[in-house]
Amino acid sequence: MNTNSSNIMALAPNTSTKRETVCIFGTGDFGRALGHKMIQSGYPVVYGSRSTQISNLIPKDAEVLSHAEAAQKAAIIIIAIQRQHYNFLTPLAEILRGKVVVDISNNLKLNQYPESNAEYLAQLLPGAKVVKAFNTVSAWALQSGALDASRQVFVCGDDVEAKQMVMNIVRALGLTPLDQGSLLAAQGIENYPLQLFPMWKFPMFLSLGLTAFFFFYCLALDIIYTYIYEKNNFSFFIAITIPNRICPVMALILLALVYLPGVLAAIIQLYRGTKYRRFPDWLDKWMLCRKQLGLIALAFASLHAVFTLVSPMRSFVRWRTSKGIISQALNNKTEPLDTTNAWLSDSYLALGILGFFFFVLVGITSLPSVSNSVNWREFRFVQSKLGYLTLILCTAHTLVYGGKWFLSPSAYRWYLPNIYMLSLVVPCIVLVVKFVLVFPCIDKPLTQIRQGWERNPKYSE
Ligand code: NAP
């Protein structure tokens, strides 16, 4: 065994076409998947294992040696072993001195240990250059090549050169390295794969809560009320009528909630006269999940479009239409065309179609593959200007359809307003405040504040 070969191995990037040997400790699921991918990308791979017997699961071009022998063959050692077994590395500390040791481990719980696994590894191997990487990629995705959704590899470490070497390997494997800074970032990187849709939690809970509220609201007013006072059994409304009331209402309210934090932030900045003070935590969090709120709103709007398209097929609608025709025939009287109603219904449909079109456009632009292909100004134009246009069109669509109920006493069953009236409250507030904010006498100081001007400089201390 040549113990000197490791000492003369340079850390500088290899300029020859042959890639440097990479050592992987551990022949488990991840070690094998990573080894396969590395061999495919042209890296000679040597495994360090407790057993040097070659199994047919191990990539056929790889060598399997003891940990000490394998470590001496490479400048980069990837530790594909669970943290709880790391103490086997202590006797190898001298061999690993000066080498780049890559920690890829994850934990079972958020903040499971007081220090990150990578920092723990650095304590065990004080002479090694520890880098954290690859923990956000799964063995299955590496092996199957299904890396579309998880190409990003977070990398952190205290040694810049070592980090660069690992990032070069990440790139060579067809992945995208994201430098997260020093090893202090490792705890956050280890927590990342354990998070369950962190940005979706609030929008999901809010949508579920509001949907449940509106469902029971409609159930009470459209089914229970009509059953008690009109002796009509409209329980079948649960299948399509009520969902087709809840979906547009939810879409409109959630869309308005995407724009509400922006106008609140503007009011706060105008009141404080500075942009250099943090917004309250709840507003910060709300702003961060606007995209998710918008996408859920778009999902409700799409459902509304589908429910509306199937409406003419419903037996209730066909029964109502034929009842109208029969009553005209029985009375021997043809109802004249009410052009006001025709105007209202056509405008309502046109506004809905246009609103939905812009809604889809704004939704598509929020996809990373699309947003990456437009510049910041174009992105802002779509998300802000077209987004507000969508809100205006959808609010107008609801107003034309449901506005008449504001004045009709029959709409107030049990003294409660119709669901369409409720849905208009938040959008109207957002649009009115936004309208006030674009007045030059308000827009001018707001723009100045956003460019760094302060009314009272003590706020920036
Ligand atoms: P695994 O299938 O259980 O393999 C772990 C390997 O560690 C074993 O095959 C064994 O290799 C070695 N090992 C076990 N006990 C040991 C001990 N007492 N002393 C020394 N070596 C020991 O685990 P894995 O799924 O490959 O995961 C390995 C690491 O990658 C973990 O830290 C995990 O968090 C991380 N990771 C895994 C994935 C994934 O998708 N699986 C994704 C990201 C990160 P030998 O028999 O060759 O010694």
Image: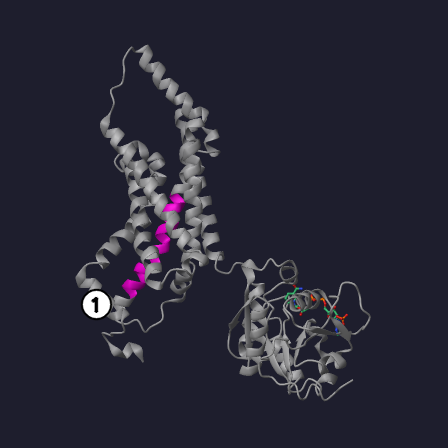
Q: Quadrant of ligand 1?
A: bottom right
Q: What element carries label 1?
A: helix
Question: Residue 401 appears at what percent x and percent y?
Answer: 31, 36
Chain part drawn in magenta: 249-268
Side (left or right) of 306 relative to 85 = left
In which image quadrant can residue 59 be found?
A: bottom right
Side (left or right) of 25 relative to 390 = right
In which image quadrant can residue 399 be found?
A: top left
Question: Residue 146 appears at what percent x and percent y?
Answer: 60, 57
Side (left or right) of 434 relative to 59 = left
What is the residue that sits farthest to the right in this orientation? 53
Q: Which of 335 and 427 is in front in this view?
A: 335
Residue at the spot 37% in from the left edge and 55% down from the top edge:
258
Q: Is 145 a magenta residue?
A: no
Question: Residue 106 appears at what percent x and percent y?
Answer: 63, 69
Dominant SS type (magenta): helix
Quadrant of the image containing the C terminus: bottom left
Residue 396 higher or lower than 455, as above or below:
above
Residue 143 higher or lower than 47, as above or below:
above
Residue 51 higher or lower than 324, as above or below:
below
Answer yes or no: is residue 115 visible: no
Residue at the spot 36% in from the left edge and 36% down from the top edge:
414
Q: Which of 432 and 3 is in front in this view?
A: 3
What is the residue that sits farthest to the left in this orientation? 441
Which amino acid is tagged 1?
Pro
Provide the residue designation for mark 1: 445
Quadrant of the image containing the N terminus: bottom right
Q: Is 259 a magenta residue?
A: yes
Question: Residue 42 appears at what percent x and percent y?
Answer: 65, 70
Q: Which of 71 and 278 is in front in this view?
A: 71
Side (left or right) of 237 relative to 147 = left
